[in-house]
Amino acid sequence: MKYAWMDTYLLDKAGVTKDLKEEWNWIRYQIGGKMFAAICLGEDGNPWNSIKPDGEVPDDLLKDMLDKSYRLVLGGFSKKKQQEIIMSAKAVTNGQSIQECLTDCEKGSGNMAFDYKKEYKEFYMPKNKPGIIEVPTMNYIAVRGKGNPNEEGSEYKESIGLLYAIAFTIKMSKKGNRQIEGYFDYVVPPLEGFWWQENQTEMDFAHKEKFRFISVIRLPDFVKKEDVDWAKEEAARKKKQDFSKAEFLAYQEGLCVQCMHIGPYDAEPETIQKMHDFIAAEGYEPDMTEHRLHHEIYLSDARRTAKERLKTVIRHPIKKIL
């Protein structure tokens, strides 16, 4: 066989496995359980295919065809699955880094940006009935403040501007001098907020002036504290504004109950009551503390969406009743 290099070449690609399909007499090469190439053996054990193993097809052309097939099949998976396949692989593609593998995959699948809402629906798109979920540690850009969020010039409204300026500075870093290790293109995740009131375990929506908050936007895992510090300085330089209130925050929620709330923010207590009734029936109780907070994820733009159609994920920490 002329193309003796093919087996090694294919197995060097991140996440690739091979097996022998005995009834077909095929050596199959797969990514994520899906075949993207095969060496087809005749009855005498010699390989055959539409590309004959006689060496007439140049090696470079054949490698290019194999590469495209690999990217096409890998690109058919969700972005989340692509990352799981490649990040768990011990090998990399022909000397490429993991990030280069992901970049190649993006090229082969239309360069679609990673969208956290779509790829992690369990965290961002729950049903409009309560459910229990374990939430891992996530990293955020965060701005802390207090007061009624609806007032003009409130600390809350100021926090939103700060967060988005930093979030898009990081997202667009690929076009500047800052090359963040492990960068991949992504959609900026939705605005979120952790809320509480001093000396209270339940939210009193009638007294918004007593609200305290940590307004946040999730960061991709490749973003580190030093990248956020750089983005703060860069945003301050461009916008001539103080970004010192913003910080890098790692937050672990753990065991929670969550539900999609559809409607005005002031109607949230009705959904919260459903959540608490649900967990009581399941043998849990709320576990609100100074470190475990009322959490909201805003999936609608309140400026452009009718109040009755607003979508907000509400999440509360819980614990098992002893």
Image (tube, rainbow, N blue to C red):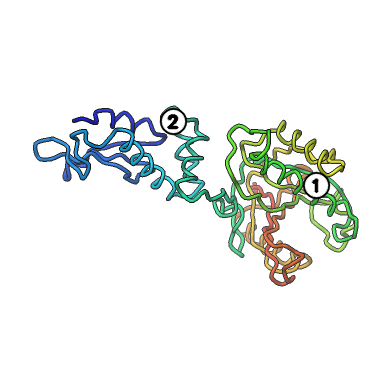
- Side (left or right) of 45 relative to 59: left
Q: Position of residue 71 (x, y in %)?
A: 41, 43
Q: Residues within 10 Å of mark 2 (few under 14, many from 20)?
A: many
Tell me the number on the disc at residue 162: 1
Q: Residue at x 72, y 55 (%)?
A: 296
Nearer the N terminus, badge 2 or badge 1?
2
Q: Position of residue 108 (x, y in %)?
A: 45, 46
Image height check: is 34 above or below 312?
above
Q: Residue at x 60, y 32 (%)?
A: 181
Observer-nearest residue: 171 or 83? 171
Q: Which residue is mark 2?
A: 92
Observer-nearest residue: 150 or 163? 163
Q: Position of residue 186 (x, y in %)?
A: 60, 47
- Side (left or right) of 48 relative to 162: left
Q: Position of residue 289 (x, y in %)?
A: 76, 45
Mark 2 residue type:
Val
Q: Residues within 10 Å of mark 1 (few under 14, many from 20)?
A: many
Image height check: is 261 above or below 105?
below
Asked where in the image residue 297 lies, by quadrant, the reply is: bottom right
